[in-house]
Image (cartoon, rainbow, N blue to C red):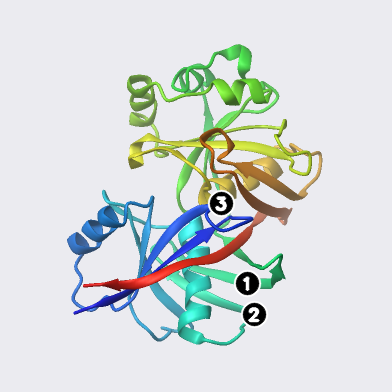
Amino acid sequence: MSRRFYIVDVFAEEKYGGNQLAVVRDTEGLGDGDMRKIAREMNFSETTFIVAETPTDGGYDVRIFTPERELPFAGHPTLGTAYMIRREMIGRPVQSLALNLKVGRIEVTFDAPVGGLDRLWMRQVAPSFGEPLAPGPVLEALGLGLEDWDDRYPVQEVSTGLPFIITPVKDLAAVKRARTMRERFAEVVRHTEAKDILLFCPETYSPSNHLNVRVFAEYEGVPEDPATGSANGCLAGYLVRHGYFGTAEIDVRVEQGYEIGRPSLLLLRAKEAGGTIDVRVGGGVIMVAKGELV
């Protein structure tokens, strides 16, 4: 049985400029092991599988796999899959659609194309916050020291469905020096629910952006991710909770992937009202290729 698949580029400003994603249709007969194997062969950070061609209670059932495991939620697979569903399955413009993921239902909305790229937004689950972590071990896991830490803000676990350790540093020099120290990294995440570290600073390569981000995902088998919607959703909640920009509402541009030669752009909007933080993450999406698995 042949299975249709698509490759899309997410959080891109041009083709091959973001985080690529494989989306697989015709999943009848595939078990969990099959999905992990296909994800391994696709060789991307995540691969999504559309479980049914028609919506269930208004949402499309989708599963997300890495070669190692199934994820309850991930950002660029959510946007990339929604883009593909509208383009290849619905076949007409719609303003929004929903995906049913392990974490729950995620709504995706569509902006008018900008520069030939569709722009999509997803509303993430409201962020939850863990207790602040000791900054020393987390920084050491990335080859940094306490002198690099922006001590106005905590090192903290945050989750919008998938948890990350949010780590603020002072400048781009610290971000550039960061690297995974495997034994120390493994020791840090052994004691935390989050298994990946987001490092960020207010200094950027592009003057039109507000933050530079790196996401280290050694636990997932990806030394560094070029564009991570789930992690940046956690960052958006963190920025609002700690008043990083001095307001209870943010609309910022985040650059990621510059240090590994794959610059991406993520758009973050978040605001706090009534004790709840509403988080939206957006970016450009473009079709790269399509084919069949045989």
Q: Give the Cα distance between marks 2 and 3.
A: 25 Å
Label tally: 3
Give the amino acid type for the residue marked by disc 1 in the picture: Thr
Residue 216 drawn at (x, y percent) = 46, 35
Nearest the eye: 236 or 128: 236
Q: Give the Cα distance between marks 1 and 3.
A: 22 Å
Give the amino acid type for the residue marked by disc 2 in the picture: Gln
Image quarter where the N terminus lies is bottom left
Work out whether mark 2 precedes mark 3 in sequence or the reverse, and give the earlier one: 3
Q: Are marks 1 and 2 in contact (CB under 8 Å)?
A: yes
Residue 73 drawn at (x, y percent) = 43, 57
Q: Which residue is mark 2?
A: 95
Determine whether, in the image, residue 114 is placed left or right of residue 133.
Answer: right
- Residue 17's tag is 3
Residue 32 drawn at (x, y percent) = 21, 63
Q: Are marks 2 and 3 in contact (CB under 8 Å)?
A: no
Q: Tell me the quarter of the picture where residue 47 sits.
A: bottom left
Q: Is residue 160 visible?
A: no
Residue 184 drawn at (x, y percent) = 37, 20
Q: Secondary structure at mark 2?
A: loop
Work out whether mark 1 precedes mark 3 in sequence or the reverse, and give the earlier one: 3
Determine whether, in the image, residue 113 is placed left or right of residue 15.
Answer: right
Give the amino acid type for the residue marked by disc 3 in the picture: Gly
Q: Identify the residue at horizontal 69%, vertical 38% (top origin).
A: 211
Q: Which residue is mark 1?
A: 109
Note whether 241 is above or below 160 in the view shown.
Answer: above
Q: Secondary structure at mark 3?
A: loop
Determine crowd level at label 1: few under 14, some 14-19, many 20+ residues with C-alpha closer than 10 A.
some
Q: Secondary structure at mark 1?
A: strand
